[in-house]
Amino acid sequence: MKYKIYYQENKTIKSLILESNNLVNVNKHTKYPQNVILVQEDIKYDFSFFYNDDEKLEMFYEIKTMLDSDLEFEYIIDILLKSDFNAKNMKILQTIKQSIKNGTNIYEDLGVFKNYIGSGLVFFKIANENSNLKECMQALYLTLKKQRNIKNSIKNLLTYPIILLVSILFTIYVLFVYVIPKFENIYLQFGENLPFSTKILLDVKYLLSNYYLGFIFIFIIVLMMSKLLYKQYKYHIDRILLNNIPIFSKLYKNILFYKLFLSLSLQINSKESFYNALLNSVEMINNDYLKSKLQYVLKDIKNGKSIYKSFKKTNTFDMFAIRLLHTAQLSNKLEEILKSIVNIYDSNIKTNIKKFKNYFEPLLIFVLSSIVLWLVLAIMSPIWDLGSVIK
């Protein structure tokens, strides 16, 4: 995997790309610079989005279930290779089989599937270190299941607005292509007396009819520029997304924190140390601003500061999480406290989704209704006034 390293040299921020098996080992590279500011994976686009999450979840559920029945891991992989999973799942199974055969590290060999497997990939690493494959596959399955539930919640949230938006776009297309041309001869009879709303409608139709290729080109340019700007200023944009957008930022933050503490909880339950669990979790965060804060937490913990003070110092995490981490440190019940934090964030996500839905859907309906009202008035007003024009 490739990682982009941002570092300071002669009071200038520079960057370079290094190859490493994982984020943990990237600092062992011979070209690793001094004064590093941020390390992030140089992610290349793949087509993981188009694969069905249910198939991935089903495969790891079968692995977990067979392990619970005390079957040998290699035998389990041989059984699953005879199944009819999708191409990506079959490649994962083949890679695992080859790793077992060659005696290599499964976690490192599966690194090419990181975008597909997601944050659960780290449990192969923990299983290799602690020889607790059964517990780690249970944790991997739970991670994938929780992530799928969040994704489905977001899909359910967006389904209704998307249907409304597509419907109104289709309606506008039909009006512009089939309806308005039928009335244009009538509109011409009004001359300068044409209602203002109808004039705007005709101007919009003229622009879309004659310059639609230009609009498509501008749209593509805007998308490309947005992608470039996001890549160039990802840290600052991620900070805005996390903190400064009403309603959305709260939901986004709760989802990120939920994934973080879920990962920590499952790793701690799999007998990983807190420092290593947090180090592994940093790799899973795709928000550069939060990732940089967590790197400061890692540095403080490594230097001997308490977990509670290290998290509090970032001024990023919710106070209830900070207080619970303090309680965990005092009571030595980190595993139980982390589960409580995960449950609270899970509840917060459901509340935020409901609130977002309560605000967003009425606003969208209002906007779309206003567009429909304008179209109706623009089309029908001249017809209603046609009698006065004839007289």
Image (tube, rainbow, N blue to C red):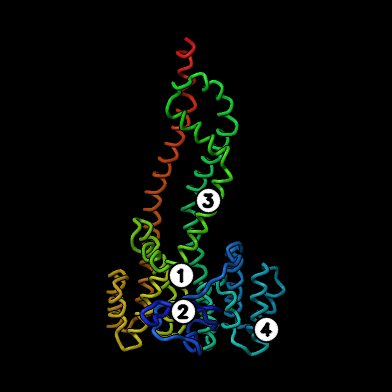
Measured in 3D between alpha carbons, the distance from the residue under mark 4 to the one under mark 1, in whole angstroms, is: 30 Å
Measured in 3D between alpha carbons, the distance from the residue under mark 2 to the one under mark 4, in whole angstroms, is: 32 Å
Q: Position of residue 359 (x, y in %)?
A: 37, 48
Q: Earlier in the sequence, mark 2 or mark 4?
A: 2
Q: Amino acid at mark 2?
A: Ile
Q: Name, please, the residue furthest toward the front.
A: 10
Q: What is the count of numbered marks? A: 4
Measured in 3D between alpha carbons, the distance from the residue under mark 2 to the one under mark 3, in whole angstroms, is: 32 Å
Tell whether label 1 touches label 4 (CB within 8 Å). no
Q: Earlier in the sequence, mark 2 or mark 3?
A: 2
Read off the residue under disc 1: 286
Q: Name, please, the residue furthest toward the right.
A: 82
Question: Which secondary structure lies at badge 4?
Answer: helix
Q: Which mark is residue 212?
A: none
Measured in 3D between alpha carbons, the distance from the residue under mark 1 to the one under mark 3, in whole angstroms, is: 26 Å
Q: Which mark is residue 219?
A: 3
In this image, 110 relative to 339: left or right?
Answer: right
Q: Earlier in the sequence, mark 2 or mark 1?
A: 2
Q: Earlier in the sequence, mark 4 or mark 1?
A: 4
Residue at (59%, 87%) from the top-left corner?
105
Which quadrant of the rendered structure holds the N terminus?
Answer: bottom right
Read off the residue under disc 2: 5
Q: Which mark is residue 98?
A: 4
